[in-house]
C-alpha cells in the first residue's frame, strides 16, 4: 500500500474542505476503498475519514419520505421498519448484496460509489481505461461474462455492481451533497452515475471534495415491490442481472435493471407504454443492447427475469 496521510474531521464542512485537495478521498466503511488501496488500484494521498460525522440517522421528511444519512450502514437501512414497510424493494436489494459482516460496515454513500467488479480493473497487468485512462480495455476482447450489454462504449464495458443503487433508481431517490465551498445540491439518482463514454474513470457527477450527506426518498409509492437478483450462486455473488420493480394496482409499473450497464438502467417511456406486458417492456429496455459473445446470454436472462417478476408482482 502506498503511504497516505489521514484525518478524521468532526463536521461536514471540514470534511468537504479537507477532501478538496488533489489526491484526497473520503473513507467510510472502507469495504471497497481499502481493498483497492491494497491492490494499488487506488492510491489516495490523503484519506478523510467521515465516520465521526453525524450522518448515521434515518429521519422522516416533513413533506413525506425519508432522509437517509450517508453513514447509515446497509444492515441498519435494510432493517429499518419504515423502509421495510414502505420501500420493500430497497430492503430486498440490500439483503441480496454482499454478506452480513460487510453490510454491517458498508454505508449508504459508499455503496452508491463502490467501483466496478470488472476482472481487468483489478488486474494491474492488463490495460484498463478506467484504472489507467488511455491504456485500452482488456474486457472488450477478453472475458466479459459479467460486463455491460447497455450504454457501454468503445472505451469501457464495465457494469455498476451495486444492488442498492438499482432499488434507489426505481424509487426515484435523490443524493444530497455539500461541496468544499459550502454550497449544497440535490442530484436525482438518474443523473448521478455516468455512462462510460470516453472517460470511464469518471463514474459520477460528483466534484473533487463533494461529500454525500444523505440520500432522500420521496413519499412512499406503494404497490408490490420486488427485487430479483440472478447470479452464479445463491449468495455472496454479484448480479449477472437484477430487476427492481414496483407494480401498482392501477396497472402502472416502474422497472430498473442492474448488472447490465455502468449505471442502474431504467427507461421511463418504456414503462408508460408496456406496464402490463413484461415481454414487450423487456424488448423496449433492451432495444439498444450491444452484448459481447460472452454475455449475450444476459438478453434472454433479462427477458425471462422481467416477465417472471411482473407475473409474480401482479399475481
Ligand atoms: C466480498 C464482497 C462482496 C460484495 N458483494 C456485494 C453485492 O453482492 N452487492 C453489492 O451491492 N455490493 C457488494 N459489495 C460491495 C459493498 O456493498 C461495498 O463495498 C460497500 O457498500 C461500500 O461501502 P463503504 O462504506 O465500505 O465504502 P468505502 O469503501 O468506504 O468507500 C467507497 C467509495 O465511496 C466514497 N465515499 C464514501 N463515503 C462517501 C461520502 N459520504 N461522500 C462521498 N464519497 C464517499 C469513498 O471515497 C470511496 O470512493 C461487496 C463487497 C465485497 C468486499
Ligand atoms: S470494461 Fe472498463 S473496467 Fe473493464 S477493462 Fe475495460 S475499461 Fe477497464
Image (cartoon, rainbow, N blue to C red):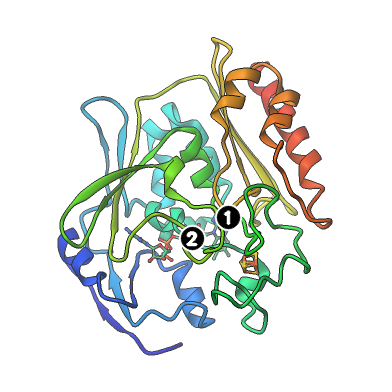
Q: Residue at x 66, y 56 (%)?
A: 237
Q: Residue at x 20, y 62 (%)?
A: 180
The reply to whether callout 1 and callout 2 are in contact (CB within 8 Å) is: yes
Q: Is there any visible trace of residue 78 in the rendered image?
A: no
Dot 2: element: loop
Left or right, 296 with reference to 284: right
Left or right, 288 with reference to 4: right
Q: Residue furthest bottom?
A: 3
Does the closest atom of ligand 1 sit within 8 Å of the Cβ of label 2? yes
Task: Residue 96 in the image: state x and y as whole percent.
Answer: 58, 46
Task: Residue 123 in the image: state x and y as whole percent.
Answer: 64, 78
Task: Specify the label residue 161 is tagged with.
Answer: 1
Q: Residue furthest top?
A: 250
Q: Is there any visible trace of residue 28 in the rendered image?
A: yes
Residue 130's image quarter?
Answer: bottom right
Q: Residue at x 43, y 81 (%)?
A: 43
Does the closest atom of ligand 1 sit within 8 Å of the Cβ of label 1? yes
Q: How many marks?
A: 2
Crowd tier of the residue under label 2, counting other residues whose Cα lies within 10 Å: few below 14, some 14–19, many 20 or above: some
Circle 2 residue: 114
99, 29: nearer the viewer: 29
Q: Quadrant of ligand 2?
A: bottom right
Dot 1: element: loop
Query: N-terminal of the two: label 1 or label 2?
Result: 2
Amino acid at each position: 500500500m502506498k503511504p497516505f496521510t489521514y484525518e478524521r474531521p468532526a463536521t461536514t464542512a471540514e470534511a468537504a474542505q479537507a477532501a478538496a485537495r488533489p489526491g484526497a478521498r473520503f473513507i467510510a466503511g472502507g469495504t471497497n476503498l481499502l481493498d483497492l488501496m491494497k491492490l494499488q488500484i487506488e492510491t489516495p494521498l490523503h484519506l478523510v475519514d467521515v465516520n465521526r460525522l453525524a450522518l448515521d440517522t434515518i429521519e422522516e421528511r416533513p413533506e413525506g419520505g425519508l432522509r437517509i444519512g450517508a453513514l447509515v450502514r446497509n444492515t441498519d437501512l435494510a432493517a429499518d421498519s419504515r423502509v421495510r414497510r414502505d420501500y420493500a424493494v430497497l430492503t430486498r436489494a440490500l439483503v441480496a448484496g454482499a454478506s452480513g459482516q460487510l453490510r454491517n460496515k458498508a454505508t449508504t454513500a459508499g455503496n452508491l460509489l463502490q467501483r466496478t467488479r470488472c476482472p481487468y480493473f483489478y488486474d494491474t497487468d492488463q490495460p484498463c481505461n478506467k484504472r489507467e485512462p488511455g491504456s485500452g480495455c482488456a474486457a472488450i476482447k477478453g472475458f466479459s461474462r459479467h460486463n455491460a450489454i447497455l450504454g457501454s462504449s468503445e472505451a469501457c464495458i464495465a457494469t455498476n455492481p451495486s444492488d442498492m443503487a438499482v432499488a434507489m433508481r426505481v424509487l426515484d431517490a435523490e443524493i444530497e451533497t455539500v461541496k468544499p465551498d459550502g454550497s449544497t445540491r440535490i442530484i436525482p439518482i438518474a443523473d448521478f452515475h455516468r455512462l462510460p463514454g470516453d472517460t470511464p474513470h469518471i463514474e459520477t457527477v460528483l466534484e473533487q471534495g463533494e461529500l454525500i450527506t444523505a440520500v432522500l426518498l420521496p413519499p412512499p409509492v406503494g404497490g408490490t415491490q420486488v427485487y430479483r437478483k440472478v447470479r452464479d450462486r445463491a449468495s455472496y455473488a454479484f448480479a449477472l442481472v437484477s430487476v427492481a420493480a414496483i407494480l401498482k394496482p392501477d396497472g402502472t409499473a416502474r422497472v430498473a435493471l442492474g448488472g447490465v450497464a455502468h449505471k442502474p438502467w431504467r427507461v421511463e417511456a418504456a414503462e408508460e407504454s408496456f406496464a402490463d406486458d413484461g415481454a414487450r417492456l423487456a424488448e423496449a429496455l433492451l432495444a439498444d443492447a450491444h452484448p459481447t459473445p460472452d454475455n449475450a446470454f444476459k438478453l434472454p436472462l433479462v427477458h425471462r427475469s422481467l416477465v417472471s417478476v411482473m407475473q409474480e408482482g401482479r399475481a
